[in-house]
Amino acid sequence: MIQLIRGFKDILPGEVELWQNIEKTARSLFEDFGFKEIRLPILERTELFARSIGEDTDIVEKEMYTFPDRKGDLITLRPEATASVVRSYIQHKMYAKDPVQKFYTIGPMFRMERPQKGRFRQFYQINAEVFGIDSPFIDAQIIFLAVKLFSILEVTDAKVHINSLGCPKCRLKFKESLSAFLPSVTEKLCPDCLRRSKKNPLRVLDCKNSSCREAIIDAPAIIDYLCPECTQHFETVKYGLEKFKIPFVIDKRLVRGLDYYTRTTFEIQTGLLGAQNAVAGGGRYDSLVKALGGPDQPAIGFAIGIDRLAEITGLRNKDFTQKPDIYIAALGEKSLPLAFGWSCNFGLEGIRCEMDFSNRSLKSQMKRADRLKASHVLIVGNNELEEGAVILRNMTTKKQISIPIENIVEKVKAELKSYRLSDK
RNA sequence: GUGGGUGUAGCUCAGUUGGCAGAGCACCGGGUUGUGGCCCCGGUUGUCGAGGGUUCAAGCCCCUUCACUCACCCCA
């Protein structure tokens, strides 16, 4: 037997309906707020990710699916979507038409990590990105949208964490003072953090190791080093969130694993996912468009993990699967071809129809109709053919009526319609 | 990449000091010659994850390997 690749998964009927529901909800919400869908390739040149996410981030260092194509060029299965959206924005010169562009995109991402609860090597994200707006109000609105989606999907345990990473100007000052602080707690840091403290000191603040957490309690916080412009920006984001009545906590340790973030960063965290706590994350990346060769346009975006969202939504136990409206129980060789014709016509009329082709006993066909939760069964056998009328049985009320074979699809359709009306 | 746990029927899982591979559910058929759910009766289902070793004999002991899972790390 050939098995699927480690960390990958099939989403089977029964679960896929929940995913469809999540995606439908997200689409409609984003469209209502003026976001346009953009569909992007899942393979890009490796360089795109190396330059945007950052050469010495974990993602680029050890998690990407990178390989040479037949020509020898290095290509990579995208580990996140933002880089591709930015690439597309620049490549198609969308800023020329209007620098302000709002996109959403839904699709798979790939990271070669060890799988565990809420973490897969192919996972799915809903991304939303806004280009060309530097107002902090858009930061607040983006967070509002994420929160709104979570509440529509009845997620109970979700908390907004926000932080500001400042602009390159204030971050430089902060890095200096952090680098000056770290040597004073060297003994408490884990080996990883010792390495980070030289290479990328910001990452130390993000470590979950309890000893490291303790060590950095008194470490300088970046918000204390924000320049006046960045401070003002952050204040307005908070003001906006309060205006939207969105509860949030300021999380000084929220640094995030991608280098391109500036100013506002945020995560939506939950306690329902084991060791994973982020269900959504994002932030502002004002320097990225220019860094990738585009104009100097600000941008902000976020990603929601669909796999994780599907695990924690309150809709999880709802049954979204579609049940047949009609199950045709055909008895005898003469009935089968007739029933087959009707089943096709029911389908064309939008009436979900199932039937059995094996000419089994009525009892076993009824059993199957019951198992499939069909609302009605249409019984046709030799008796019915002689009389020129079939039996329509309502599976909940057990009431049976006789329906002439002439124009049967129309008649059944009318019958189902009145049934549905009386049902509501 | 590192560590722990788990792999036996479609599913959930028993399986004693090594001695004929099991249960419940599901599925199929019958009880009711053409009427579902409850009940009763009967039936089908296995590379015991894979490979090797020890043994008269291995689901069980030893070695190797793979997968799943949880955690570290990081993130969605």
Image (cartoon, rainbow, N blue to C red):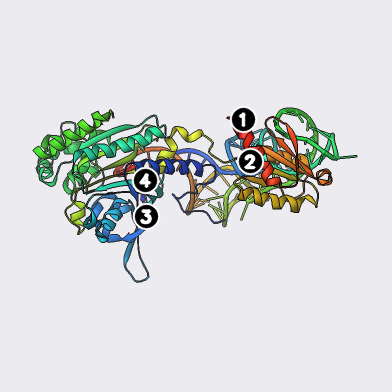
Point out the frontmost of discs 3 and 1.
1
Kind of residue at disc 4: Ile
- Both labels 3 and 1 in a single chain: yes
Chain under numbered label 2: A
Coordinates of residue A152 in the picture (x, y in percent): 40, 34
* Res. A374 visible in picture: no
Point out the frontmost of discs 1 and 2.
1
In this rendering, the answer to whether A52 lies above or below A416 is below
2 or 4: tag closer to the N-terminus: 4
Q: Secondary structure at mark 1?
A: helix
Cα separation between marks 2 and 4:
33 Å
Front-most of A275 and A279?
Answer: A279
Quarter where residue A369 is shown: top right
Cα separation between marks 1 and 2:
15 Å
Q: Secondary structure at mark 3?
A: loop
Q: Tag 1: Cα neighbours inside 10 Å, few (<14), some, or many (≥20)?
A: few
Residue drawn where x is 51% and y is 34% of the image: A318
Point out the frontmost of discs 2 and 4.
2
Cα separation between marks 2 and 3:
35 Å
Q: Identify residue for label 4.
A: A126
Coordinates of residue A317 in the picture (x, y in percent): 51, 33
What label does residue A422 carry, if any?
Answer: 1
Q: Identify residue for label 2.
A: A325
Front-most of A289 and A59?
Answer: A289
2 or 3: tag closer to the N-terminus: 3
What label does residue A39 carry, if any?
Answer: 3
